[in-house]
Image (cartoon, rainbow, N blue to C red):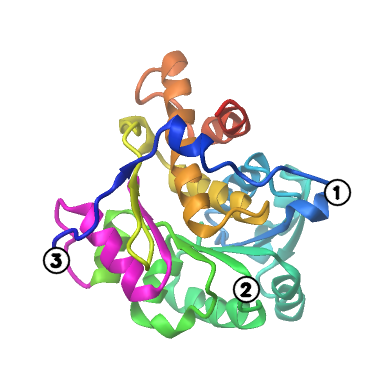
Amino acid sequence: MTNRFEERVITLKVLREWPLPDPQGSKEARGTVLVVGGSKFTPGAVLLAGEAALRAGAGRLQLAVAEETAVQLSIAVPEAKVVGLSQGDQLRKLAEGADVVALGPGLDDIEETTALMRDVLGAAGPDTGVVLDAYALGALSKDAGLLRQRRTVLTPNVVEAQHLLGRDPGDDLAAASAELAERHNAVVSLYGHIATPDGRAWVEESGDAGLGTSGSGDARAGIVAGLLARGAEPAQAACWGAYAHAVSGQRLALRHGRTGFLARELVDEVAHTIATV
């Protein structure tokens, strides 16, 4: 498939002409994000995504992780309510009340992920914002019917895009992003290439090699979830999220070199990057 759409480069001018909703009122007005993921070996992925959502402007944060790490994570992220993945009734109740569900960071079992998606997305409303990342995209590649929500952003890397497409996406990531957006009726953000089901497309060109670090994708998914929670539409959240992710890396590169910074340091830059647009 060749790219049918002309991509618009994401610049400061583009973002300033497309301002994020102005935060008003209480924390409830900026939305609740529920991050679901984190096996007992990778709870940090949920921490990164959750803190990134708060840095991007979400008002409230809830985390669902493997039972073995729930207490430790509640101490590490005192801003969040934390539950275990095995607490089915409680998790479904959180999904029902969440404005945005980010699902996938840190999961490592495809069958468990599929069951979680069926349970959590089944409990969430049709207008709940959804961000799917990591193993959630692998589950989606096997059963497209798991996704029921309209306000959805998929954030695959190249390997995950390959699973979703059923083939190597090749060098034309713009075309791959557009194809996936149309196939899943969702906004897709693939390595800076953002596409919508109705044919709009953008590209963020300032990302550099340092973003290819452990946990970086979790941070990006969290940024998008936080922007959705504060009221951005999915395409807007994906574009602003790609910019905030890339430019936060640029800021860190000045201090640590192109490949010396960490994903948790990216998270700490996000609020300042967004505020200075």
CA–CA distance in space, label 1 to label 2:
21 Å
Left/right of residue 194 with respect to residue 148 in the rendered view: left
Question: In front: 123, or 234?
Answer: 234
Inter-mark Cα distance, 1 to 3: 46 Å
Circle number at residue 1: 3
- Disc nearer the start of the sequence (1/2): 1
Q: Quadrant of the N terminus?
A: bottom left
Question: Quarter of the image holding residue 129?
Answer: bottom right
Q: Earlier in the sequence, mark 3 or mark 2?
A: 3
> Mark 2 packing: few (<14 Cα in 10 Å), some, or many (20+)?
few
Q: Is residue 180 magenta?
A: yes
Residue 136, percent from left and from top: 45, 68
Where is mark 1, residue-wise?
26
As helix, strand or loop, the secondary structure at mark 1 comes to: loop
Q: Secondary structure at mark 3?
A: loop
In the image, what residue type sits under mark 1? Ser
Q: Residue at 38% of width from left, 36% of height from top? A: 211
